[in-house]
Image (cartoon, helix red, strand yellow):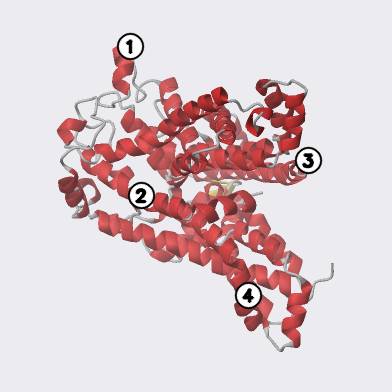
Amino acid sequence: MAEGEMIGVKTRSRVIAHFLLVIGVIVVAFPIYYVFIASTHSIQTILRPPLPLLPGPELVENYGDAMTGGVGRIGGVGVGRLLWNTTVVALGIAFGKIVISMASAYAIVFFRFPLRMVCFWLIFITLMLPVEVRILPTYKVMVDLKLIDTYAGLILPLVASATGTLLFRQFFMTIPNELLEAARVDGAGPWRFFKDILLPLSLTNIAALFVILFIYGWTQYLWPLLVTNSNSMNTIVIALKKMISFADADTPWNLVMVTSMLAILPPILVVVLMQRWFVKGLVETEK
Amino acid sequence: MNRATFPHRLLPWLLVAPQLAISFVFFYWPAVQALRQSTLREDAFGLKTQFVGLANFRRVLSDPAYVNSIQVTAVFSVLTAFFSMAIALLLAVQAEKVVRGKGFYRTLMIWPYAVAPAIAGMLWLFMFNPSFGTLAWPLRQLGITWDPLLNGSQAMTLVVAAASWKQISYNFLFFVAGLQAIPRSLLEAAAIDGAGSARRFWTIVFPLLAPTTFFLLVVNTVYALFDTFGIIHAVTGGGPGKSTETLVYKVYNDGFVNLILGESAAQSVILMVIVISLTAFQFKYVERRVHYG
């Protein structure tokens, strides 16, 4: 008897498993495929359902129009500009958060200073204050600091949060004491120890956190909605919302679908290409 | 264990300073302001503010619109958490059974994780748009009067579908990891004793997955409460009527659109209490249950 059959995974049940998985994949991936299809058809085809299941002839024209600002509702801002804004925000949040949280975790684990645990708790408690529960007062702070419609305003409030610090603290605590002692015997200061020993050891964690934070930054909604007024500072998600009116017939759906495609593609590529670190990081860090 | 450390005094302060500074400016200060604002009331012209104690809270909690929004949030969260977890678990169990194509299925399954909730909502409304949605078309052929822009429960169905779809990837990855941690020997022993695959699932796999399930339950509740603002805002705007107005959407709407500052702040404080209890619950019970058995 084969090992597979021993625990009851017979060929029949494996076929059923494949069948269910294929249905699952269709349900999960179909909406994204559908956006791609819609982005290659003319508005007339889109408005006459059902939409064909294969790409249409308008791909080049639709993408060209959207890139050069063919959508009137967002003041003619091109998709290129929106992608740039979103990239700046996502990278700013990812790198900013990694740097800031590594620094604070390094201080908390490898130094002894007064109020060390108070600092840790002050950072930890921010977990319980998501932006949704402090919308108005945070907005007021942004106005007072003149950060409305700036990249700093889009990035800064989102770079401090406890998750990164908690992750790095947990990881740093697994570093054996001997490593630090040996480094100190060799005359290495905090910077040398960090650069030559800790950083190389942390690379997997950094890669994992990078994917999670990049997606987090790219998909932000409430915050960019509040701190951007001008069309040229919008992220692509907010611009999409402004382009669409479900009640009204003159939404340029073909261009909206191009914009959706371009809004979805970069984060999907990041997740798929960095899948190994992402899956490991997600499952390990969030637990 | 006594940790080896560096003797520096000033350096650690410089290292924690950026995070503490941002936490104070953008987290603590606004949170304190929300608390303060929740006890004040402005007159109609915004000229005078007056301390009113807990009156804003009393007003919010006795407001039928707020009670409605609590119900909407509860229905929305329970349905979203249930569907996204049940579908993810079903698929994760199938993925454990197959030998070939595991990587292929996983790669396709994680796509929605990268899609912003607001975009997920817009895609679903695009597909199910009453006038030209390709998937609304068969519904109409079947004689169903489908219009999520006018019918409250259809609007709720649509936002639940979009929110669950987006969360399947996340739950799938965690269930796969949880399933891999279950010792094969247990399943083999049960198989030898003659337990069929359904029986093995309910008596061994499902109970041993409990830590993962509890963890995901908390995460999905937080997700449904807060991260789905984009879906509601982009797709239904809380409507039709108030049938999809969740708590977070109402805080936003009362504060930014209707400009009722005191009551919006009181709602913020209530939400803060909900988040704090959920986080405390997670750390007290879920963390402990992770080290099951």
Residue beneath disc 4: B15
Q: Position of residue A223 (x, y in %)?
A: 45, 52
Q: Residue furthest bottom?
A: A187
Callout 3: chain: B
Residues B94 and B18: in front is B94
Amino acid type of the residue tagged 2 in the rendering:
Leu
Do the residues indicated by labels 4 and 1 lie within the same chain of the protein? yes
Q: Residue furthest front?
A: A1
Callout 3: SS: loop
Callout 2: SS: helix
C-alpha span from label 3 to label 1: 49 Å
Residue beneath disc 1: B142
**Residue B250 showing in the rendered view:** yes
C-alpha span from label 3 to label 2: 39 Å
In the drawing, what numbered circle is on residue B292?
Answer: 3
In the drawing, what numbered circle is on residue A119?
Answer: none
> Which quarter shows the N terminus of chain B?
bottom right
- Marks 1/2 in contact by CB < 8 Å: the verdict is no
Question: Going 49% across and 62% down the picture, which residue do you hit?
Answer: A94
Instruction: Single out the mark in the foreground, 4 or 2.
Output: 2
Q: Position of residue B32 (x, y in %)?
A: 61, 55
In the drawing, what numbered circle is on residue A265?
Answer: 2
Q: Residue furthest right?
A: B1
Amino acid type of the residue tagged 1 in the rendering:
Leu
Callout 2: chain: A
Residues A191 and A205: in front is A205
Instruction: Single out the mark in the foreground, 3 or 1.
Output: 3
Asked which quadrant contains residue B117, the reply is top left
Q: Residues within 10 Å of mark 2 (few under 14, many from 20)?
A: some
Question: Going 55% across and 45% down the picture, which residue do you hit?
Answer: B265
Residues A10 and B58: in front is A10
